[in-house]
Image (cartoon, coloured by chain):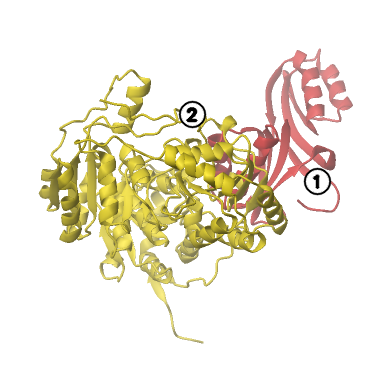
């Protein structure tokens, strides 16, 4: 018998498990219940980024995951530390982002006693995690961690939370890390059904006006190359959801831009006139479909998705194919014939010419212009956004050519997401320029992270499109509430340049068009965390727009102004 | 339209709240839910009676299948299965009505499991129609309390769900 033992505490085992899962970076914030874990981190090789609010730890893990394709990890203490993660976890859940969140918990003997800093975080996160665990026996910790990483990153990805009582982290046990995960109740389907694929091939053959509609699933399944090959083979135009931006090259002649509420007119017109829609890794969200009854009235729909629950959830589809998008696309490339669709594409090209995205160019500083300038200065940058008008402009006026270069909270629409997610993206992809395109409202929800980027030397560039309003809400008030700007004016609430400087970051203010490019270039060259405060036209609207409840071809231009 | 779902789940703490939580947050209505361990002690079986059209049912089944702790979900068709529910009914009774109630209980092959001067407790096992019929006949006497287990069901024949 071997004398060798591998006895260690739960906290030590947690670190060992992270090594074995290939985790090199975690985002977190310490506290009483996780003291033993932080003590182990103190001399571990894992890089710990100390954020200034736990919500940012979850967002940063999310940004890291979206930028790198790896699973993001965050850590917080029990009670308020854990509840502060909730918005970040919900954001990751809605956009199917793989993160593993570790929370401390009060000692097992105190659970249920309303102990100091106790919160039932597994109960709270039940509806916003793919799965969660409360560790009850230290011997199960390695197996649980192995399962958590497996569940988070496979099938339809999503957040998994592991709640660890403090006594579990100090208890010693014989460490053993399982090689494999055995879950009889979790076996995602990867290979699409051949019969269904055959039916899809038939429909594609028959179609004369097809449109490919792609979502974030194409990016998370790393299917971009297959998508390009497939679209070129059948010569079908491609439109993307917000989270699908970058899945298909934005400069490709078959690209239609985004569809839906603030999509391009020609993407929406194409959907409405299509006779076949091939949806891939997208879920027919209400921001995409508009009035659901009048969405794509003439089209048969093929829906490719790894999650069977998305099939026919919002819209009845003709041919569902459940499985991995990449696998299915490769099959489709093999099985389909070359097609031309020259009439259909000519029609689309006319729309593209007649109703391209545009804004009024005058001597004012326009937010759209700033996005274009960022794109010109750093076309391979990773663009992360907050939520609101700036987010829509960032989706419309930046040309994304590669996956994982546009990172945004699509499903939950979380203001305050962008800055911490940009931190995660920059930590994961340090060689890339990373911009947080922000509004003055959203940025104030996470501005404390200026301390993080300065102290950990994470040179992200924050581009605030400062219009003095909570702009998207103001836009709706202008259009649908007779310009009663109830609680949306936040003008002059803060001097962002001074705020940046107070934290030790570089602050630049830009008020004129000619200052835009030099400011962006200075920020990139500085290699320092930089905040650029762009004072933009304050009542600019996001255009075009499908009013809530309208069909997506009832899309309006809103630019006729002042 | 009512459907009976047999849901096999990992016999672990928290599974019931995962399933119940799913129903409440997605707005599905549960008529009844019965849970117990199966012949395999690591697996529990939930029998859930849910109301909704085919589309709702399809979503319920898919969403249940997405829960990591759910092993299998089967829609049990009524013509192809045996279903039962156990109900305890405490009914008001005195010397004047006791005989009449006992007669009704006999007809239904139910059992009297407790007697007092002012009440009887009746135990009945059966399908929904039988239980409803008994309840209707007992109501005029005054039902004081009623507890039911919720429906459980097995498919007929040798095959398992």
Q: Position of residue B52 (x, y in %)?
A: 67, 32
Q: Identify the secondary structure beneath mark 2.
A: loop
> Viewer-proximal residue, A225 or A88?
A225
Image-based side of A83 in relation to B14, left or right: left
Q: Position of residue A534 (x, y in %)?
A: 19, 42
- Do the residues at pointers 1 and 2 share their chain? no
Q: Which residue is mark 1?
A: B155
Q: Identify the secondary structure beneath mark 1.
A: strand
Q: Is residue A83 visible?
A: no
Q: Quadrant of residue B113?
A: top right
Q: CA distance from mark 1 to mark 2?
A: 52 Å
Residue positioned 21% across, 58% down in the render:
A459
Q: Which residue is mark 2?
A: A554
Please state the total of marks drawn on the protein image.
2
Q: Colour of chain A?
A: yellow
Q: Nearer the viewer, mark 1 or mark 2?
A: 2
Residue positioned 85% across, 22% down in the render:
B104
Task: Give the chain letter for red.
Answer: B
Residue A472 vs A390, above or below: the answer is: above
Q: Is residue A522 visible?
A: yes
């Amino acid at each position: 018998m071997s004398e060798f033992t591998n006895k260690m505490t739960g906290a030590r085992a947690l670190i060992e498990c992270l090594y074995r899962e290939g985790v090199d970076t975690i985002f977190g914030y310490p506290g009483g219940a996780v003291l033993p874990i932080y003590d182990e981190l103190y001399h571990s090789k894992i890089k710990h980024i100390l954020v200034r609010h736990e919500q940012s730890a979850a967002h940063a893990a999310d940004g890291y995951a979206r930028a790198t394709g790896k699973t993001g990890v965050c850590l917080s203490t029990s009670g308020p530390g854990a509840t502060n993660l909730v918005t970040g976890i919900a954001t990751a859940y809605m956009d199917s982002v793989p993160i593993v969140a570790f929370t401390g918990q009060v000692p097992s003997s105190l659970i249920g006693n309303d102990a100091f800093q106790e919160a039932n975080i597994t109960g709270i996160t039940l509806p916003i995690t793919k799965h969660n665990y409360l560790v009850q026996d230290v011997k199960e910790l390695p197996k649980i961690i192995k399962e958590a990483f497996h569940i988070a990153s496979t099938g339809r990805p999503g957040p998994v939370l592991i709640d660890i009582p403090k006594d579990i982290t100090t208890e010693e046990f014989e460490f053993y890390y399982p090689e494999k995960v055995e879950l009889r109740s979790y076996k995602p389907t990867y290979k699409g059904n051949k019969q269904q694929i055959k039916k899809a091939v038939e429909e594609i053959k028959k179609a004369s006006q097809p449109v490919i509609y792609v979502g974030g699933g194409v990016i998370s399944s790393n299917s971009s190359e297959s998508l390009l090959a497939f679209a070129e083979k059948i010569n079908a135009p491609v439109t993307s959801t917000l989270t699908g931006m970058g899945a298909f090259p934005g400069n490709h002649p078959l690209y239609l831009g985004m569809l839906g509420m603030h999509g391009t007119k020609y993407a929406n017109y194409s959907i409405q006139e299509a006779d076949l829609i091939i949806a891939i890794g997208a879920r027919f969200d209400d921001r995409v479909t508009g009035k659901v009854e009048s969405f794509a009235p003439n089209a048969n729909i093929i829906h490719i998705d790894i999650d069977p629950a998305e099939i026919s959830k919002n819209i009845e589809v003709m041919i569902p194919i459940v499985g991995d998008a990449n696998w299915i696309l490769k099959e489709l490339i093999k099985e389909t014939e070359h097609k031309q669709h020259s009439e259909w594409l000519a029609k689309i090209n006319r729309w593209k010419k007649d109703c391209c995205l545009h804004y009024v160019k005058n001597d004012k500083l326009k937010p759209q212009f700033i996005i274009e300038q960022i794109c010109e200065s750093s076309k391979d940058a990773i663009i992360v956004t907050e939520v609101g008008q700036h987010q829509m402009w960032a989706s419309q006026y930046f040309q994304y050519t590669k996956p994982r270069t546009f990172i945004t909270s699509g499903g939950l629409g979380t203001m305050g997401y962008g800055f911490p997610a940009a931190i995660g993206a920059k930590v994961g992809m340090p060689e890339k320029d990373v911009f947080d395109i922000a509004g003055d409202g959203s940025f104030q929800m996470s501005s404390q992270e200026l301390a993080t980027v300065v102290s950990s030397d994470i040179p992200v560039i924050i581009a605030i499109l400062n219009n003095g309003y909570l702009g998207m809400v103001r836009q709706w008030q202008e259009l649908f509430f007779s310009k009663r700007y109830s609680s949306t004016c936040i003008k002059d609430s803060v001097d962002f340049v001074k705020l940046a400087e107070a934290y030790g970051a570089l602050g630049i203010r830009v008020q004129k068009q000619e200052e835009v490019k030099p400011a962006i270039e200075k920020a990139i060259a500085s290699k320092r965390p930089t905040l650029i405060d762009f004072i933009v036209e304050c009542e600019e609207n996001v255009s075009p727009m499908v009013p809530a409840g309208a069909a997506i071809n009832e899309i309006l231009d809103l630019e006729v102004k002042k | 339209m009512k459907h009976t779902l047999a849901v096999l789940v990992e016999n672990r703490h928290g599974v019931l709240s995962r399933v119940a939580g799913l129903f409440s947050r997605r707005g599905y209505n549960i008529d009844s839910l019965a849970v117990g361990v199966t012949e395999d002690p690591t697996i529990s079986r939930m029998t859930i009676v849910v109301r909704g059209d085919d589309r709702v049912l399809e979503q319920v089944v898919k969403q249940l299948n997405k829960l990591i702790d759910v092993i299998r979900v089967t829609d049990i068709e009524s013509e192809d299965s045996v279903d039962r529910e156990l109900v305890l009914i405490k009914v008001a009774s005195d010397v004047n009505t006791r005989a009449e109630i006992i007669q009704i209980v006999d007809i239904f092959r139910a059992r009297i499991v407790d007697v007092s001067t002012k009440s009887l407790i009746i135990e009945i096992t059966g399908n929904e129609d039988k239980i409803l019929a008994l309840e209707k006949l007992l109501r005029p006497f005054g039902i004081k309390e009623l507890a039911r287990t919720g429906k459980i069901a097995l498919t007929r024949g040798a095959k398992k769900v």
